[in-house]
Amino acid sequence: MVLRKGGTAAAAAGVVLAGFVGLVTLGTYAASGTPQQQGNAAGLSPGTVPAAYQGPIEQWGRLCPDLSPPLLAAQLYQESGFNPRARSGVGAEGLAQFMPGTWASYGTDGNNDGRRDPWDPLDAIASAATFDCALARDVAKIPGDRQSNMLAAYNAGPGAVTKYRGVPPYRETQGYVRNILATARSFAAPADPAAPVEVSAQSAGAIYFAQTKLGTPYLWGGDGKPWQQGRFDCSGLTRAAFESVGIILPRVANDQWYAGPHPSRDQLRPGDLVFWATDLTDPRSIHHVGIYVGGGYMIDAPHTGAVIRYDKIDTREYIGATRVTSDGAQALPNRNDDDGQVIAPSRPGDPAPTTPTPAPAAPTTPAAQAAVQAAPPGRAAGAVATGSGSGTAGPGQLPAKN
């Protein structure tokens, strides 16, 4: 993406100073993300899921009291990165990564077309919720947090949760539960949209790192390594800046989008990540990221032929911002180095609930069905490679943009 030049260096430096003054005035404290809302009353924060999936996730995320739309969205993201064509090495299929045997019992006709297809996003969303709620009922009498027990049953099986009277002592399962609960905060709409989002204590350090790189030539796929002459692309710079303060972000911009809650434009604070997308209704099309410094400016690595510099953020294709948290960054899924697809979580057990398959909820609205059917095939994949800041185009993948 080509961004307009952001004023003179002196003016931008003044903006940064003002940003730091504002940051100190506000105070910095450890960010824990948007407080998690209880039950299934929580809605989705705008722009966190592809628009075609928002209605179905909002609907099916309220199928039972232990599920919520943000929790269901976080689970789907952890499983496939919203890629309806995802297939794991062990044969799990589709957006929700169902094994064929489990799908045979819990596959649900989410779009009311008379078929149950694990590759159909609406069916996968409905089936994930149906399966979650069956598991929730199966472990309802186990002490502890009900959502944690439900997620643990999804990963390790309800027998393991029953045996250990809660989340079993499996590293895979404990990580699965922790990561989905943490990622759900990035998907959740705040209970009070006017309430301020907490400021990260690491923001000032991340900005300082980025400032030391001003004037460095851009390099596609650059991570600042010695053999790259210390050059960066957009997400390579933001990743290195936060790594300098102990937070490890994913390599690509559209994964960094989920590293914390999403402040509104008027809530931006220095240190927030700011993002651009070709389709403002689909976060999978995010292609550029920078670090906000205050006063409407950011530090970014814009494009080939440019240098790391200050740029204005109020430009076309601005989709929003993320306030990075340690928990949020740590919870994000990994991607395969070869094809860029999300690596589905490992499972120590066979998650087969003993309760009968529940009746599905009311069919998804026709408008939501039409939106999914109209989604372009290239957008449905949404996978990006890990070798560059914005993603390298491949079969069924989004083209690179900056």
Image (cartoon, helix red, strand yellow):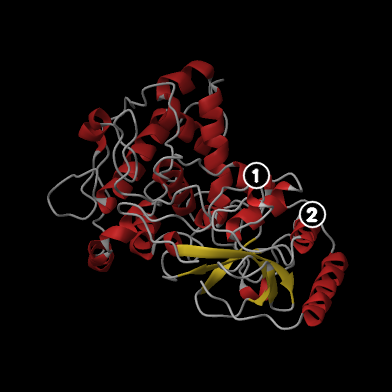
Q: Residue visible at 33% across and 53% down?
A: 381
* Vertical arrangement, residue 183 with respect to residue 191, above or below: above
User: Closest to the observer: 278 or 237?
Assistant: 237
Q: Which mark is residue 25?
A: none
Q: Secondary structure at mark 1?
A: helix
Can residue 37 be seen from the camera position used here?
A: no
Q: Secondary structure at mark 2?
A: loop
Q: Residue visible at 29% across and 47% down?
A: 85
Query: Which comes sooner in the sequence, label 1 or label 2?
Result: 2
Quadrant in the rendering for residue 8: bottom right
Residue lying at the far top of the rendered structure: 163
Q: Is residue 323 left or right of residue 130?
A: right
Percent x, y of residue 357: 26, 35
Q: Residue visible at 45% across and 49% down?
A: 385
Q: Pointer 1: what residue? A: 327
Quadrant in the rendering for residue 261: bottom right
Q: Is residue 114 left or right of residue 400?
A: left
> Label 2 sits on what residue type?
Ala
Callout 2: few (<14), some (14-19), or many (20+) C-alpha neighbours within 10 Å?
some
* Vertical arrangement, residue 397 with respect to residue 285, above or below: above
Q: Is residue 217 left or right of residue 59?
A: right
> Label 1 sits on what residue type?
Asp
Q: Which mark is residue 201?
A: 2
Q: Are marks 1 and 2 in contact (CB under 8 Å)?
A: no
Q: CA distance from mark 1 to mark 2?
A: 13 Å
Percent x, y of residue 104: 20, 33
Callout 1: few (<14), some (14-19), or many (20+) C-alpha neighbours within 10 Å?
many
Tally of marks = 2
Percent x, y of residue 184: 53, 49
Q: Is residue 182 left or right of residue 28?
A: left
Can residue 202 be seen from the camera position used here?
A: yes
Quadrant in the rendering for residue 88: top left
